[in-house]
Image (cartoon, coloured by chain):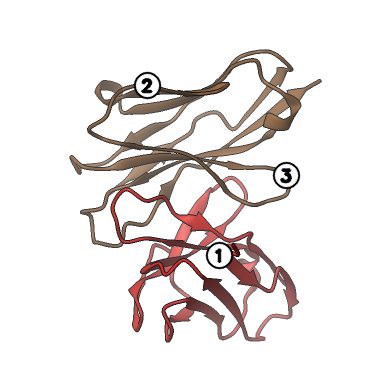
Amino acid sequence: AQKVTQAQTEISVVEKEDVTLDCVYETRDTTYYLFWYKQPPSGELVFLIRRNSFDEQNEISGRYSWNFQKSTSSFNFTITASQVVDSAVYFCALSAPMDTGRRALTFGSGTRLQVQP
Amino acid sequence: NAGVTQTPKFRVLKTGQSMTLLCAQDMNHEYMYWYRQDPGMGLRLIHYSVGEGTTAKGEVPDGYNVSRLKKQNFLLGLESAAPSQTSVYFCASRHDSRNQPQHFGDGTRLSIL
């Protein structure tokens, strides 16, 4: 069985602060993919990043960075110099293509980030 | 570039009524999914399809049926709506390559009174 845990239900920061959103996953598969999605107040789901289990390099995209550590089964997301527009619910998700062939996503419960001006 | 389109965006039903949610994608994707999102629970998989004419159950399929008669469309049906089915429903599709992310529709907010 697969599981994704986002222990932080809600985080509130002041603009320009750095913030890290935690994600811990469980899977028995050796090949899997990890994702982060953003859900702004308007409700749509916006894809942010995909990482496969064989690539443990950290990734940086502008103010966003991701830290993937297989040893601790974690895929954490850091926003540097947060902005009000970063306020949203962020979901971490896992896909193990070899599980049943469905390649569906298992989502964490989400972390609501509020960035105060 | 429509991507994934869900119809309707909002709907209020009475207990026992039936309705069908439509998902249409124009990316020629093989895989399509229906999820529901409830407060504090993230998204959970209801049903999915790996190609035209095929469907399968996800984690929470009870009370729902689906059909994939055309590759571009994936329909989610509620035969007899219950208040427990009040939720936001998301449709998603993806290419059959393992590296591709899922593309989501904007969601359908459904309330059952």
Relative image position of residue B24 (x, y in whole percent): 54, 73
Q: How many marks?
A: 3
Tag 3 secondary structure: loop
Considering depth in this image, is A22 or B4 the residue closer to the camera? B4
Any mark on residue A70, and which?
none
Q: Are marks 2 and 3 in contact (CB under 8 Å)?
A: no
Element class at badge 2: loop
**Closest to the observer: B63 or A65?**
A65
Q: Chain of mark 3?
A: A
Query: Which amino acid type is marked by label 2?
Result: Asn
Q: Quadrant of residue A67?
A: top left
Q: Is residue B111 left or right of residue B46?
A: right
Vertical order, A2 against B21 (above or below): above
**Residue A41: numbered disc:** 3
Mark 1, residue position: B4
The residues tagged by marks 3 and 1 sit, at their Cα atoms, a distance apart of 19 Å
Q: Kindly report which numbered mark, 2 or 3, lies closer to the viewer in this rendering.
A: 2
**Marks 2 and 3 belong to one chain:** yes
Residue shown at 63%/86% (left/top)? B18
Measure the alpha-carbon separation of dots 2 and 3. 28 Å
**Viewport quadrant of the N terminus of chain B:** bottom right
Chain painted in red in the figure: B
Find residue A91 and report its horizontal and vertical position in percent: 52, 40
Q: Categorize mark 2 by other alpha carbons within 10 Å: few (<14), some (14-19), many (20+).
A: few
- Looking at the figure, which quarter contains the C terminus of chain B? bottom right
User: Chain letter for brown?
Assistant: A
Which is nearer the eye, B30 or B108? B30
Q: Mark on residue A58?
A: 2
Q: Residues within 10 Å of mark 1 (few under 14, many from 20)?
A: many
**Residue at 50% from the left image edge and 30% from the top image edge:** A7
Chain containing the residue with disc 2: A
